[in-house]
Image: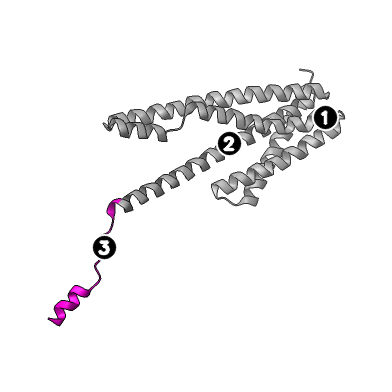
């Protein structure tokens, strides 16, 4: 009889709320997905800005090797900014639309319901947003050498200022990209910086050579 009373006195074990646990796991998965998606977008923006920075600076240095006036360099930089931003936007639009079509076709082949299909659509990247973000990132990067050269009339000083501001921006973009990609910051920053110097130096040297040949 005593043993029976002891059994009844034991604390009752509450059943696990499986539904609540499942919901918490789903929320956690959504948070991880959103974080990964934001990190991917940010890394793409950094790479786009780096492209704008380096291509525009190289163009300005190349044309500046032949035409040393500030107006020519600024016009070259503006042309590079507009052309590069349009090219990035169109390329990103076509690429993301292709990915969107492939993902949608895959979901339709899986015979998803209307709600599942709508939920799947929300997770897919928006091609127009991707195109706009790409163009904006490129333009932001391209503005760095433009602003560096805009207010300097002396050619030698202008070139020095452009190299200095572009070098600092390359280090910053390289470091930020490394942080987002979880790579060594110093090594990645120096790699981006040296690559940028090579691009600007080759563009300057080859344009100078072609210009001196009278072509």
Q: Residue at x 45, y 32 (%)?
A: 125
Residue 4 picture location, percent across and down = 14, 77
Residue 170 lies within the magenta run? no
**Residue depicted at x 77% and y 40%:** 164
x and y, in percent, of residue 207 in the image: 75, 26
Visible in this render: residue 118?
Answer: yes
Q: Find the distance from the CA under tag 2 to the CA under tag 3.
A: 50 Å
In the image, taking residue 178 as reference, residue 215 lies left or right, namely right
Classify residue 38 as left or right of residue 83.
left
- The quarter of the rendered structure image containing the C terminus is top right
Question: Would residue 67 be seen by someone viewing this image from the given angle?
Answer: no
Q: Which residue position holds label 2? A: 45
Residue topped by disc 1: 151
Labels 2 and 3 touching (C-beta < 8 A): no
User: How many marks on residues?
Assistant: 3
Tell me residue 38's x, y (percent). 51, 41
Which residue is the site of mark 3? 14
User: Which residues fall within the magenta stretch?
Assistant: 1-19
């Amino acid at each position: 009889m005593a043993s029976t009373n002891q059994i009844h006195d034991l604390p009752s074990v509450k059943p696990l709320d499986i539904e609540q646990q499942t919901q918490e796991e789903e929320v956690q998965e959504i948070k991880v997905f959103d974080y990964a998606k934001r990190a991917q977008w940010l890394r793409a923006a950094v790479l786009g800005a780096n492209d704008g920075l380096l291509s525009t600076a190289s163009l300005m240095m190349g044309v500046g090797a032949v035409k040393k006036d500030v107006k020519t360099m600024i016009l070259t930089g503006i042309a590079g900014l507009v052309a590069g931003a349009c090219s990035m936007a169109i390329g990103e639009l076509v690429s993301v639309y292709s990915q969107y079509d492939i993902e949608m076709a895959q979901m339709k082949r899986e015979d998803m319901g209307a709600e599942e299909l709508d939920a799947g659509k929300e997770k897919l990247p928006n091609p127009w947003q991707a195109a706009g973000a790409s163009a904006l990132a490129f333009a932001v990067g391209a503005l760095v050498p433009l602003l560096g050269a805009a207010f300097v009339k002396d050619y030698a000083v202008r070139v020095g200022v452009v190299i200095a501001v572009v070098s600092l921006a390359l280090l910053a973009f390289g470091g930020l990209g490394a942080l987002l990609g979880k790579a060594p910051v110093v090594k990645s920053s120096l790699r981006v910086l040296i690559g940028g110097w090579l691009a600007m130096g080759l563009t300057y040297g080859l344009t100078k050579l072609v210009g001196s040949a009278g072509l």
